[in-house]
Amino acid sequence: IAETMPDVKDKQILQNAFERMNNIIKELSTVEKISSNILNIHKENISFEALYQATLKIMLLENLPIKKEFKKFSLCVDIDLFCIVLKNLLDNAVKFNTKKEIVAVANEQEIKIISYGEKLKHTLDYYTEPFSQEEKRSDGFGLGLYIVKTILDLHHFNFSYHYTEGKNIFTINLPS
């Protein structure tokens, strides 16, 4: 259908929407495989910068207002799965941000995604359960943080949240 459209702008919007839907379906399939214990993770060493760039490619968003504070380091992760983790955290930061400013901090000990917004009304445990949301919205299913937590558990990484000075801070603690 998209290929038959004459307007290049509308065509691109429709193609991006289909690509986004495909990515969501792939994520849900991956989570189902994880929860059914039929997915093996394949860890590889990769620089965090390369992992971050791979994540941006699957996000299909342009001009993300992200301030990067990265140290040069590598980590051993399943690249495809970890890109899903970063994508979901960045998607949430973009979606719920009130000041159009996001900070991504990464070093050998931790990865933090920081954005301005309202404090979560529940504990992180609530949001890492499937289909959990603040209130019913039409722009999501309440699976993002569930997917994040599930993948991080497979990697034996800790995941935490805190709120300070108007900022939501999601942290992935990396093992030594």
Image (tube, helix red, strand yellow):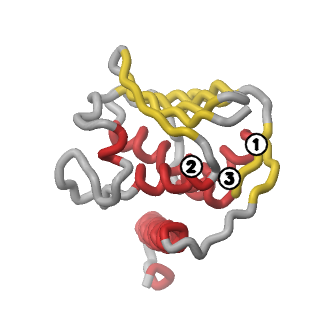
Kindly state the secondary structure of the residue where label 2 is placed: helix
Give the residue drawn at x 36%, y 34%. 97
From where the camera sits, is residue 36 visible? Answer: yes
Query: In the shown orientation, is residue 139 left or right of residue 146?
Result: left
Task: Say which of marks 1 and 2 sits in front.
Answer: 2
Kind of residue at badge 3: Ala
Q: Nearer the viewer, residue 123 or 92?
A: 123
| Identity of the residue drawn at 23% across and 35% down | 121
Q: In x, y percent, where is residue 85? A: 55, 50
* Residue at x 41% of width, y 49% of height: 145
- Residue 167: name its quadrant: top left
Q: In the image, which disc is placed on residue 152? A: 2
Q: Local crowd at mark 3 within 10 Å, few (<14), some, or many (≥20)?
A: some
Q: What mark, if any, has residue 75 been given in the picture?
A: 1
Precedes in sequence: disc 1 or disc 2: 1
State left or right for residue 72 relative to residue 109. Answer: right
Disc 2 packing (10 Å; few <14; some 14–19; many ≥20): many
Q: Secondary structure at mark 1?
A: strand
What count of labels does the image hold?
3
Marks 3 and 1, how far apart at CA:
14 Å
Q: Position of residue 73 (x, y in %)?
A: 79, 33
- Find numbered disc 3 in the image and state the secondary structure of the residue it sits on: helix
Task: Say the numbered circle drawn on residue 54.
Answer: 3
Placement of 135 over or under 66, stated as above or below: below
Q: Looking at the image, is mark 3 or mark 1 earlier in the sequence?
A: 3
Distance, label 2 to label 3, CA atoms, is 18 Å
The kind of residue tagged 2 is Leu
Q: Amino acid at mark 1?
A: Leu
Q: Position of residue 77 (x, y in %)?
A: 71, 51
Horizontally, residue 69 falls left or right of residue 43, namely left
Name, please, the residue furthest toward the left: 135
